[in-house]
Image (cartoon, rainbow, N blue to C red):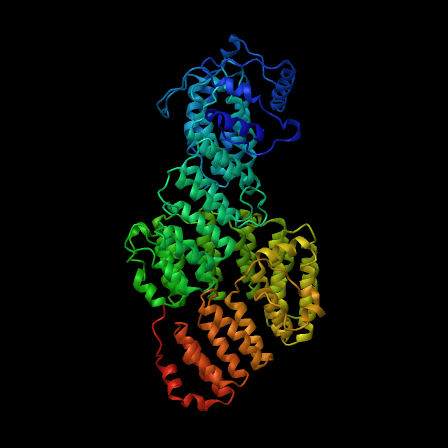
Amino acid sequence: MCNQLIRLARTSAHAVLAMPLRRLHASHRLLTTSASRLAAAATERRVPRPVDSRRRSSVASNLHAKVSNVPPRLASTPAAHAHLDPNMIWSPLVTALREKNPARALSAVEKIPFDELALSRPPRRARLGRSSAITNHDEGLDEVARLLDDVPSVKKDSRQAWNAMLVALLNGLLRTRGKSDSLPHASKPWILVGRLAWAVAARKATVALDPLQQLVDMIVPVTPKVPNQTLESLLMAHAKAGGMERLQETERMYREFVATNRVTLKMSGIVANLLADAAAHPDAPTDGRWGKDRVAAVRAIMDDAVRLGFIPSPFANDFLNGSLIRAATWQNGPLAAAQVTMVMADEGASLSGKTLSSLVMKLVEIQCFDQANELLALVDPQSNERFPFSVYVHVLCATRKYQEAIDLVGPRLEKVPRADHDWQLYTAHFEVLYALGQFQLMFDLHDDVIQSGMPLGPRYYLNLIVQTTRLGQPALDRALAYAEEMIQLGFPLDTATVLKLRREVVLHNDKIAKSRLEALLAAHGGAGTLSHGQRRYSEKVGVVLFACRRADTRDRDQKLLRARANLEALTQVGTCPPRLARRWWGQFMETLTFVYRDDPARLFCELRSAHVRLFSDPSRRDYIERHEAIFYLTQIMKPLSYARRLDLVLALWDTCILRLPSRNEALVQDPVWQMRIPGVPTPNMPLMCIVLDTVGRFGDLATLLDVEATLLKRIDGRTWPADENLFTTLIEAHFRLKDPSGARRILLDVLPRSHFDSEAKLRDTFVSQARLHGFSVLLKDHAVRSAIYSGPWPTPR
């Protein structure tokens, strides 16, 4: 089917239509009429050309196979149509769609006798009023098509009855009877198809793709000229509902549209957006035209848009720019994406706050504040394209500039225009208020949000519950009240919220709160938001691990053994997604570190066993090495440091991060720790701090100077991130290895050169470590005293 449509598109621009939304089952894989017949159908008389007698039976059999899965049509006569009252047939469906009731809409569709409908009259042009009667079937179908534009997206309404209704409607339309009065002969059937495709895309209804394509195949022989707007809707349905599974077919569709001059700028944006998403999916196919380089693929689409005259230059379209930045972020990391963005800005790119917001947030998450501030400077705060206020507040909060955040937006957000108030801004502001200890103001602002009727969602409530539970057990009742309020507003208890509440209940051993939470989940089905595996992990493993962190917990060894046995059962090879397995075993390793941190030999033995178990599945190992290597390295290096295995920490640092041969034989002697990480990874700051701290505790000065030189070279070259905490750890390592001159050099030379100021934590660490290790005389140095108490370096960039 796919290849035949491609050949047809190359011969006639009028015959270009949406590519098949996926290969059909083997029983109807070759479902199409011949290309010659389709081309001939486009002629004015629409008389099919003679078909070779040798092919006639083949075409007939293909057409028969195409509809073999459609129920047999009922025989109809003129008398049979008399009892089909259009108003009675279509009004229930129209009413249900107007009321946004998918269950009633599904029931109404199932009652429509599609087998007996006759569609031949032009539909009414004006929208029907709520009290208007439907006088013919075309009019009813036309009104249904209009209402499909209002079908809510899956984000706004997650009820699966919408998808079932679309499938039933499509299958019903496939059963419309006759040759002269069927859907293909109705007035402008492509309008209906386009709106159906838009609804399928909005709902991400994968199950509706096959019947949608069969409907397209049914219409093409009669009406081969497909409007561009319908092609856009079909391509969007393919991209949104098909996702990564249909990536290659989407690429082929786009190339054929370009070749036949049927592509539009909106189509370019749809495909570029899908390719950017593909960069974040390790399971996305990579054997298409562009391979696995998603950044190059998006650039190729931008070049096509320039060549076709849609945009004057490659970086002139904000949406395409956003797709390129997202692809670079997922494929090469936030720092590399920031460099790409700066190059785009130098070449006159059209960049808005909306385009850059996600990248700025990711830079803040990895504490690359310099790069985040550079991106903030690219957009004029006074322009219409400025960043949302939530981004500014989040960056100021991450850099601990809480008072500046308050000065920007006001304690009650009174300095922010009402039109710019959204839940993301309140979420960021709550973090600032918590840091400043203004807890009651945070709760009061939430009450104002509820009174205002602002659109909220589960993520808003999750953040509110997290901030509330940080106040300890007295605030647990309030957190549960927010969960109840969340349900009353119609939001389901999502997985993260349920797990957070369960953890807090266990940590505080609050039996009353536990009963209240269980009653809440039982009454409102909140437990159903967890998958079966997640629910079992929460009940059998998560609760035990959190209990092991309590100071009064007894029999920790037995509890850990029980948790491990349950975890092994949950993560059997081939039964658990790699992402979940890595996260669950990572939480188990964190608990091992907490329990056995004072017993290095026992900790290493247990850690090694858990690591081997996690890597026993080749697919899990491949996933971790390709997509979560830095995170996992950070996760295992911390317990390795507590286990005093400096040799393994350095070996992993050399081979995985620096891409150099190991300086010792640790990985040769114990090869289970070997990892094959593709590309050139960028370490995060927790990982770098762990390496420095481990060398400072168990290494020597030569090793520290070697690691330090590598770090400073990358930091000065702005290829690795840095912050005050990294330099604080470096100063502490020098003092532990009895090198006060090295600590002095970091304070007086490296910090100013790297454009970092000294925060209170760094100054306090310098003073306390100097006194602890017998170097109090260093504090009498005039330059040191001046740096500690006044900080003579330039203003941070």
Q: Residue at x 51, y 36 (%)?
A: 238
Is residue 56 among the parts visible in the rendering?
Answer: yes
- Judge by depth and name the residue closer to the eye, 603 or 723: 723
Q: From the viewer's perspective, is residue 772 above or below residue 567? A: below
Left or right: 56, with 512 as reference point: right
Q: Nearer the viewer, residue 229 or 263?
A: 263
- Pick the quarter of the image with the N terminus: top right
Quadrant of the image for the C terminus? Answer: bottom left
Q: Foreground: 188 or 419? A: 188
464 over 288 or under it: above or below: below
Q: Is residue 326 above or below residue 154?
A: below
Q: Residue at x 50, y 76 (%)?
A: 729
Q: Position of residue 138 (x, y in %)?
A: 44, 19
Q: Residue at x 55, y 18 (%)?
A: 115
Q: Does residue 443 appear in this view?
A: no
Q: Position of residue 420 (x, y in %)?
A: 32, 51
**In the drawing, does residue 572 fall left or right of residue 496?**
right
At which x and y percent is residue 399?
Answer: 40, 67
